[in-house]
């Protein structure tokens, strides 16, 4: 029986049973047991409906039919993706690349020769080569959400990244997800496991791209552990096809004296939901979450963050901005929990939204749950239109209406990315935003 306000998940149980012999690692007993228990956990809850508070802005009614089927590996590889990849790779970044085509590792487009002290491999290979290590890693499942359980039951592949103690990556690692026409009516489920051990550091660039008109469900979960004194930066691009449903959940555990940064841009998909859930478990840790979402008619972007301050003397900063054209929809839901013992916490969040035309919808729901008494916490949210005085000023300096609008909107977005130190990444963020604006203005 499903929980109240959730959609029944029986259709996904049927899909799971039909695909059981095609699932990667189907001959591995412990993996089959984990898949089965995960599917049971999903079945007991179901898909979150619009009456579930955290999902009120992302209507998953389109998923309840179970129409998105499992795609096996032999049907996933598409050799016609080279041109698409060439346009999306950050070629100035010389580090390793891990490419997934329709949910599965694509060897010919990848380069995973890792530096010393680093394990970098696709998940299915890791299970084959080190089954005991894989079992320990995968059984560390941290989230209790029903979508997470569904992902665990039907995961196709993913990345395993382990950076050993004291190792500092010299170049970022690119993880690239590509959806092609072969993904039509399919669900593509990846699951990533990332461990940054004590005093180590890494940077990850994660890209999601796809073909317009392909109706598929791109569903990714990342389980991340950042040990004492370590640091991790993730730069994310979501530019999937205009018919794609995109759901992405990242669960992050942070030790003492750690630094975690997450920066994102959401443009593509008809419905996208990005969840970032860090838990600060060690003192003197810092989190910085930044991002922008650009929405037009046919787009719905939802960014959900849930930061848990469990110990004292930790900082978290959030800065998200939305730009919406007519018919676009967005939501920012930022929840900060400060436990009773988390004294001397600093937690700030800001969400500003710019409406380019009437007929767009921007939702903002900052939330603070504070159980300590010696803290500094703040939140702010705004929704507004372009400043007419600023537009008039720019036009008096010789700019036409479209150029004046573009300049103001670009400046509004650029503030989110001004602290990005990787120049190719910063340029890519601004270039994608600029192209989106050119199409709208």
Image (cartoon, grey):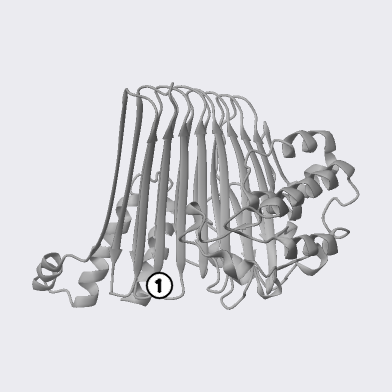
Residue 92 visible? The answer is no
Count of marks placed on residues: 1
Q: Which residue is mark 1?
A: 296
Is 397 on the left or on the right of 14, as rendered?
left
x, y percentage for residue 145? 61, 47
Q: Residues within 10 Å of mark 1 (few under 14, many from 20)?
A: many
Measured along the vertical axis of the image, is residue 145 above or below residue 228?
A: below
- In the foreground, 360 or 161: 360
- In the displayed structure, would residue 204 be above or below residue 257? below
Q: Is residue 24 visible?
A: yes
x, y percent for residue 346: 34, 30
Is 415 on the left-hand or right-hand side of 230?
left
Front in this rendered view, residue 143 or 285: 143
Element type at marker 1? loop
Q: State which quarter of the image contains the C terminus.
A: bottom left
Instruction: Residue at 53% x, 28% y: name it.
Output: 230
- Residue 38 picture location, percent across and down: 74, 47
Q: Quadrant of residue 169?
A: top right
User: Image point 42% across, 22% down: which residue?
Assistant: 312
Q: Nearer the viewer, residue 276 or 169?
A: 276
Quarter of the image for the N terminus: give it. bottom right
Q: Residue at x 77, y 60 (%)?
A: 13
Across and down, in percent, residue 426 comes to 40, 53
């Amino acid at each position: 029986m499903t929980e109240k306000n959730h959609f029944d998940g029986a259709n996904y149980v049927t899909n799971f049973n039909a695909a059981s012999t095609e699932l990667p690692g189907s001959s591995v007993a412990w993996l089959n047991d984990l898949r089965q228990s995960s599917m049971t956990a999903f079945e007991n809850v179901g898909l979150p409906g619009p009456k579930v508070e955290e999902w009120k802005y992302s209507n998953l009614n389109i998923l309840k039919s179970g129409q998105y089927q499992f795609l096996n590996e032999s049907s996933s590889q598409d050799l016609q993706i080279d041109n698409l990849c060439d346009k999306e790779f950050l070629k100035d970044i010389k580090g390793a690349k891990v490419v997934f085509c329709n949910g599965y590792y694509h060897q010919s487009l990848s380069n995973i020769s890792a530096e010393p002290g680093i394990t970098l491999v696709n998940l299915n290979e890791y299970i084959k080569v080190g089954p005991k290590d894989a079992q320990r890693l995968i059984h560390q499942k941290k989230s209790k959400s029903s979508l997470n359980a569904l992902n665990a039951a039907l995961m196709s592949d993913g990345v395993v990244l382990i950076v050993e103690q004291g190792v500092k990556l010299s170049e970022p690692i690119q993880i690239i997800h590509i959806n092609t026409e072969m993904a039509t009516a399919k669900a593509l489920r990846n699951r990533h496991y990332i461990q940054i051990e004590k005093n180590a550091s890494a940077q990850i660039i994660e890209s999601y791209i796809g073909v317009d008109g392909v109706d598929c469900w791109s569903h990714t979960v990342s389980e991340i552990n950042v040990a004492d004194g370590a640091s991790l930066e993730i730069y994310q691009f979501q530019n999937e096809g205009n018919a794609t449903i995109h759901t992405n959940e990242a669960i992050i555990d942070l030790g003492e004296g750690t630094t975690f940064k997450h920066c994102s841009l959401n443009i593509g998909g008809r419905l996208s939901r990005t969840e970032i859930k860090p838990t600060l478990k060690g003192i003197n840790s810092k989190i910085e979450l930044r991002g922008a979402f650009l929405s037009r008619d046919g787009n719905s972007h939802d960014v959900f963050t849930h930061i848990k301050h469990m110990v004292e003397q930790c900082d978290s900063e959030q800065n998200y901005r939305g730009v919406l054209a007519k018919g676009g929809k967005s939501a920012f839901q930022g929840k900060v929990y400060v436990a009773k013992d988390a004294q001397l916490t600093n937690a700030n969040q800001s969400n500003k939204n710019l409406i380019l035309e009437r007929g767009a919808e921007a939702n903002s729901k900052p939330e603070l749950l504070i159980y300590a008494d010696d803290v500094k916490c703040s939140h702010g949210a705004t929704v507004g239109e372009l400043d007419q005085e600023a537009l008039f000023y720019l036009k008096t300096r010789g700019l036409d209406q479209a150029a004046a609008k573009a300049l103001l909107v670009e400046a509004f977005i650029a503030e989110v990315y001004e602290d990005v130190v990787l120049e190719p990444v910063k340029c890519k963020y601004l270039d994608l935003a600029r192209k989106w604006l050119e199409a709208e203005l």
